[in-house]
Amino acid sequence: MSNASSSAEGGAMGQATAKRGLWSSRLAFILAATGSAVGLGNIWKFPYITGENGGGAFVLVYLLCIAAVGLPIMMAEVLVGRRGGHSPVNSMRAIASQEGLKPAWRWVAAVGVLAGFLILSFYSVIGGWAISYVGTAATGQLAGQSAESIGAIFSGLLGDPMKLLLWHTLFMALVMVVVARGVRSGLERAVSILMPALFVLLLIVVGYAMTTGHFGQAVAFLFQPDFSKLTTSGVLVALGHAFFTLSLGMGVMMAYGSYLPKNISIAKTSVTVSIMDTAVALLAGLAIFPIVFANGLEPGAGPGLIFQTLPLAFGQMPMGSLFGTLFFVLLIFAAWTSGISLLEPIVEWLEEQKGMNRTVSTVGAGIVCWLLGVASVLSLNLWSDVTPLGMFTMFEGKTIFDLLDFLTANILLPLGGLLVAVFVGWTMSRKALESELDMSPGTFSIWYRVLRYFTPVAVAVVFVYNLV
């Protein structure tokens, strides 16, 4: 039997055995994949790294990185998921078998699933911060506060393990409730509500930002490139974030791809998801920077931009309590849709591999993730002096929270993405890829060459740079 016919048969078998259900439509997949991609990376991280790296030139490089690195790998991951028709690990195993490769390739997907699971453990803690700040903003606690008082509110939150544990528990419960309900009743129904709501809230906050008198300054900051402000480090940060923001290297797109019907174009949906994800990041910048500039604050304020700089601004502005509350609700929605996607790959694997039903696998995986998150909670206060790998220079001074962040963002995600690009670009037969993607010959050739040659080199450079 030829590779092509074997692959086609394997893909059909994968679809037939995907008993967990399929997305009801192309729109459902786009909303789910966009929900995964749109998260704290867009609304929390993108604005502050843009501020740190000078604005417009960084944004331009970031957009190029999305097109040349993020999109090709996203298409590759969705392709693996749909062709395998199983959880990420079992999809990689099935395709390796079809292509006559060693089953050890399944460990590529296992790295991604592990990365997503570890990310969710501390991502849930940050999602809990957003939940806490909804109440803080809604009750007017930010109004008229000084920078020192705002800093004290944030420090007080981080220093209170019981409060952090409460919010972390609530966030994980929200994620588990959705995932336990399955593809259509859980994931699809949730994103069909949360994603439109997120866009509406974001547009409302952008509209508010337009009234500050500094919207034009924000537009210039984001879209007028000044390459004198762009450094080599900034280019690599843009490349790394383009990778992170699309939920690549986490097993998420493979898991979601396994629910994608054969009649839906992988290329078109991946392009749409990339555009929507980028639009949210840019809208977040247009929502945040006018408020920052209007209050004479620093756009390069770093990670504290969302939880210290912006609360200070909201506290000084008319109707600041209302729009501050809306902003943090928006942040919760973004974190929630991403959290759902991070838990899904391990739940899907437990259903297949261990024969657990959906509810049991969700509760089991969720509790383990929650317990790991408790360690991150304590590392912000009671265990703040605990540095598990502090004997190594690379990890010196890193708490459990910092360590999980560093290991996933700088090692596991780029490594997983690099290996997926190699697997799809160099080991899968070209006929199998062409049949799955169903693109025009010219467009396919461009994607194929970029995935084989440019993308692995770019990801490898980021990987090495982050380690060094």
Image (spheres, helix red, strand yellow):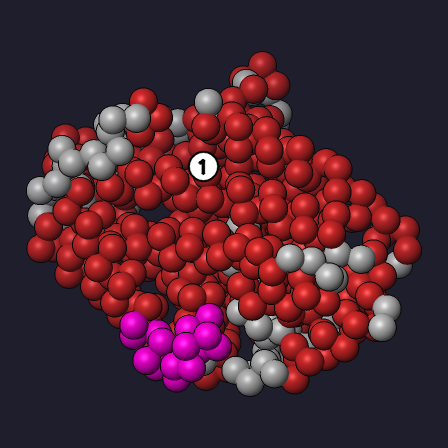
Measuring from the top left, give residue 323's x and y in whole percent. Answer: 32, 53
Q: Which residue is at 73% across, 45% downward? A: 451
Q: Main secondary structure of the magenta part?
A: helix
Q: In which quarter of the image is residue 60?
A: top right
Where residue 390 appears, as percent x and y from the top left, is 24, 29
In the image, taking residue 385 as reference, residue 55 lies left or right, namely right
Compared with 260, 244 (above or below) is above
Q: In which quarter of the image is residue 75?
A: bottom right
What percent of the width, then of the height, locates residue 381?
Answer: 12, 41
Q: Where is residue 191 in the image (x, y as percent from the top left)?
A: 47, 71
Residue at 39% over, 84% down = 357
Name the secondary structure under disc 1: helix
Q: Can residue 92 be seen in this view?
A: yes
Q: Mark 1 points at which residue?
A: 410
Disc 1 marks a residue whose amino acid type is Asn
What range of the chain is rendered magenta?
349-364
Look at 62% across and 73% down and name the residue there: 85
